[in-house]
Image: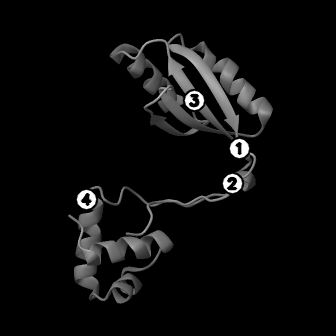
Amino acid sequence: MLDSIDRRILAVLREDGRITNQDLSQRVGLSPTPCLRRLKRLEETGVIQGYAAIVDPKAYGLPFSVFVSVRLTQQNQEQIAEFEKAVEGWSEVAECYLMTGSQDYLLRVVTDGIEGYERFLKQKATRLKCIQSVESNFALATIKKRSGLPPV
């Protein structure tokens, strides 16, 4: 269970993942050693899953986001495993969610443009026999994007 100090540590790290332990400890009101112990515990228990640079997709050359709803022909263990294994190998898939409702999965696919998305569909997604249907929704603009969780 996270206490208020753990939550303050996480809030500061969400703002600046490169902060030094000295600065972090000052911001959360702890001395450096207990702060570092808490930080290590948060990492070891998997609360903090890693640190990453947030890269602008356009600057990286992948300005095109497509939200793809996928329906499997059957929702059995074999088809689920086949689909999820394939998704793990598809570099274009930035996110994949198992869903409730009329679709089985929701993917966020990033590519360099419509041609790149077409290649992804023709060479990867539509080649899987376990896929019954694919519905694509193209993102026109990003209105809000946040990495991590909202503050509590």
Distance CA(mark 2)–CA(mark 4)? 34 Å
For the point 60% across and 58% down, the residue is: 145
Which one is closest to the eye, mark 4 or mark 1? 1
According to the image, what is the colour scheme of the structure?
one colour
Q: Name the residue under label 2.
A: 142
Q: Name the residue under label 1.
A: 139
**Amino acid bearing label 2:** Thr
Q: Name the residue under label 3.
A: 69
| Circles 2 and 4: CB atoms closer than 8 Å | no
Quarter of the picture containing the N terminus is bottom left
Q: In this view, does 138 lie to the left or right of 91?
A: right
**Amino acid bearing label 4:** Glu
| Circles 3 and 2: CB atoms closer than 8 Å | no
Which one is closest to the eye, mark 2 or mark 4? 2
For the point 74% across and 26% down, the residue is: 118
Q: Mark 4 points at which residue?
A: 44
For the point 34% across and 84% down, the residue is: 28
Image height of 87 relative to 82, above or below: below
Q: In this view, does 41 lie to the left or right of 91?
A: left
Label 2: which secondary element:
loop
Quarter of the picture containing the C terminus is bottom left
| Circles 2 and 1: CB atoms closer than 8 Å | yes
